[in-house]
Amino acid sequence: MEEEIRTRIAPSPTGLFHLGTARTALYNYLFAKSKGGKFIVRIEDTDRARSQPEYENDILDGLNWLGLAWDEGPIVEGPYKPYHQAKRLKIYQKYCQQLLAEKKAYLCYCTPQELEKERENQMKTHQPPIYSGRCQKLKPEELEKYKKEGRQPAIRFLTNDEGAIEFKDLIRGKVTFDPKTIGDFIIQKSDGIPTFYLAGVVDDFLMKISHVIRGEEHISNTPRQILLQRALGFSIPEYAHLPLIFNPDKTKMSKRKDPVSITSDCKN
């Protein structure tokens, strides 16, 4: 039996329903429906400072206005609920702990100031601005010192830099990344909130997403997500990265700067 086609749109409720999000939703919806599959809406609301209920309502209203009825997600629900990432934090923490236990991740006690200083030094010496991995080698006395200072650690994924990371993009064909340009990246912030990389990977796997269709600004995120999928033993979905939408002056459309809200600009 062939795998069921399942696509998703995962907007962040940090602004009004953007034209680019609407276009991505349309591609996901049409692809799923043309294959007899399911279209899922998942709300990525872990940005506590900027996520607002009125923005979520605007996004859902916009999808309904466009006729893009979702099979699973907010209001509709489904077998993989909840469909809000803010309600799934314990799920993400479980996988972070798994990676720590398997020594595929480690605690990072670096402060933002220390990280910025490290980046500045790398730029001065013409090195790629990636994390040095110094917290991976902390001595017991250093760990004790940081704990006494009250530092709350983030969790970093340990990137194996052996061998290129390759995947077939359904639009662009073969895409290759050098893991040496990625470095050890954060999968859970010091406040316990997962980053986009980990949360998306876990949700796509648990919600059985078969195809990730999104804008090309996410293509640089894909190698990190593939590394996590491999480390967790997850299946890797098919990826397709859509070209960006540009303004007449060739700048990228922004939901915070340009008048491209579906509900307030395009309807009028």
Image (cartoon, grey):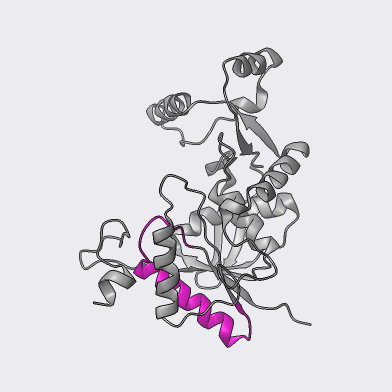
Vertical arrangement, residue 33 with respect to residue 108, above or below: below
The outermost residue toward the left is 249
The range drawn in magenta is: 11-38
Q: Locate residue 262 relative to residue 73 in the image: left or right.
A: left
Q: Quadrant of residue 65?
A: bottom left
Judge from the rendering whether residue 191 lies leftward or rightward of residue 105; answer left or right. left
Magenta-colored stretch includes residue 23: yes
Q: Count the marks: how many?
A: 0
Describe residue 92's horizontal placement relative to residue 242 as left or right.
Answer: right
In the depicted structure, whether residue 157 falls above or below residue 235: above
**Rendered position, 91 above or below 189:** below
Quadrant occupied by the C terminus: bottom left
Quadrant placement of the N terminus: bottom right
Horizontal and vertical percent position of residue 47: 47, 48
Residue drawn at (50%, 26%) of the image:
111
Counting from the top left corner in percent of width and height, residue 249 is at: 20, 64
Image point (55%, 30%), residue name? 132
Q: Nearer the viewer, residue 171 or 73?
A: 73
At horizontal 50% and vertical 69% (from top left) the residue drawn is 172
Point out residue 66 in the picture as x, y percentages from the top left corner.
41, 80
User: Is the residue 30 above or below the residue 50 in the image?
Assistant: below
**Residue 256 seen in the figure:** yes
Say which residue appears at 56% left-offset and 51% top-offset. 86
In this view, the residue in front, 237 or 52, is: 52
Q: Is residue 261 magenta?
A: no
Q: Can residue 165 be seen here?
A: no
Q: Position of residue 197 (x, y in %)?
A: 57, 50
